[in-house]
Amino acid sequence: MKLLLIQGANMEYLGRRQPELYGTTSAKELDAILRRRARELDVELDILYTNTEGEAVSAIYRADRARIDGILFNPAGFLHAGHALRDCLRSIDAPAIEIHMTNIEKRGYGSVTAEAAVGMIAGFGVDSYLLALEAMTARLSKAED
């Protein structure tokens, strides 16, 4: 099973940017946590950080052409105006799960990309990523049955 995680605008500063909201776990530490869990689940996980929506779109299309099994994504700074990202996710075969470290609804934010996802996990900090990884793995395993 092969998954792609797209980390949207500003996520590269995780652990440094607004730790009162996002905690102190750095992007590098989060990557290590996710890669360790992916190995335990026998999942190949590629991770891309980008501050450019077009780069995220291109990466998803490349992954789709390579027959990726699933997409995990935190739109982050693309949350409000990520229409190109949303349209890209609508057009691929692989399912996508949207991830947020905070409860965006509680913070008064809506996501333009959410409608292109099979689900959203939000509000659990770093654990949101682990929950999304496990949810995607479970979904894809059921599809294989």
Image (cartoon, rainbow, N blue to C red):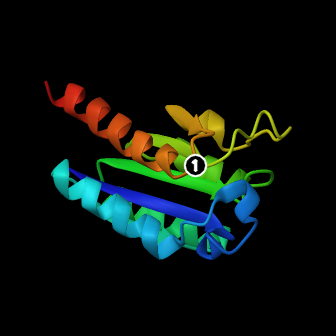
- In this orientation, does residue 91 appear? no
User: At 80% across and 51% down in the image, what residue appears?
Assistant: 80
**On the image, numbered disc 1 is attached to which residue?**
125
Q: Residues within 10 Å of mark 1 (few under 14, many from 20)?
A: some
User: At 56% across and 35% down in the image, what residue appears?
Assistant: 120
Q: Position of residue 105 (x, y in %)?
A: 77, 34
Which quadrant is home to the C terminus? top left
User: At 66% across and 74% down in the image, what residue appears?
Assistant: 52
- In this orientation, does residue 82 appear? yes
Q: Nearer the viewer, residue 22 or 91?
A: 22
- Mark 1: secondary structure: loop
91 left or right, relative to 110: left
Q: Position of residue 143 (x, y in %)?
A: 23, 28
Q: How many marks?
A: 1
Q: Position of residue 119 (x, y in %)?
A: 52, 31
User: At 29% across and 48% down in the image, what residue appears?
Assistant: 69
Q: Disc 1 marks which amino acid?
A: Gly
Q: Nearer the viewer, residue 115 or 48?
A: 48
136 left or right, relative to 26: left
